[in-house]
Image (cartoon, grey):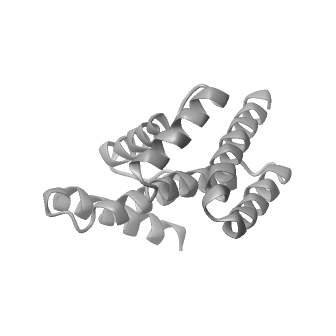
Amino acid sequence: MKQMHDELKDLFDRCSVIVEYLTTKDPHGGELLKRGYSAAFKRKSLRELRMGYRALIDMTKQLSPHEQSELDMELRKRLGSGTQEAIRDLNDAATQAIRRGAIENEDEFYLLRNYFEEIWEDETKRDEADKISRLLSEFEKRKE
């Protein structure tokens, strides 16, 4: 139970820093994001917080290189690691699911779906995108 609470708190803190930074760019959108991850934290929904965190990490990819660097420095200063580590961790989790040849849960499903959306137009990653597409379809069929 303590481990789950620690992960909830860590994800909440990371979401807070990212949204705080994004709010400097778009004050109205930041408040909506804050309500979403705060509600997930209150419900102690680790799955929702993980999904929200991944979505925020995806949003940071749209920032300019300078903005990404600023945010990364703020995360490192306040929490000890930045967005690059988060992106690497998410990519590692996606790679594990691909190697395993099966999606085990909804977290992996959403992670792979987001990764698929990033790579599907890249001709150099066509084989990987096809494999992920099959994994996503198989998981959806099992859920029906």
Q: Quadrant of the N terminus?
A: top right
Which picture quadrant has residue 117? bottom left
**Residue occupying image coordinates x 71% and y 46%:** 16
Residue found at the far left of this picture: 124
Given residues 144 and 58, the one toward you in this image is: 58
- Does the image show residue 105? no
- Judged left or right of residue 70, residue 78 is right
The image shows residue 104 at horizontal and vertical percentages of 49, 50
| Vertical side of 20 occupied by 31: above or below | below
Which picture quadrant has residue 78? top right
**Residue occupying image coordinates x 26% and y 61%:** 129
**Residue occupying image coordinates x 73% and y 29%:** 3
Which picture quadrant has residue 139? bottom left
In this rendering, the count of numbered labels is: 0
Given residues 3 and 59, the one toward you in this image is: 59
- Judged left or right of residue 21, residue 131 is left
Residue found at the far right of this picture: 42
The image shows residue 37 at horizontal and vertical percentages of 73, 56
Residue found at the far bottom of this picture: 144
- Does the image show residue 29? yes
Given residues 3 and 125, the one toward you in this image is: 125
Given residues 143 and 23, the one toward you in this image is: 23
| Vertical side of 27 occupied by 61: above or below | above
| Vertical side of 58 occupied by 15: above or below | above
The image shows residue 116 at horizontal and vertical percentages of 35, 62
**Residue occupying image coordinates x 67% and y 58%:** 23
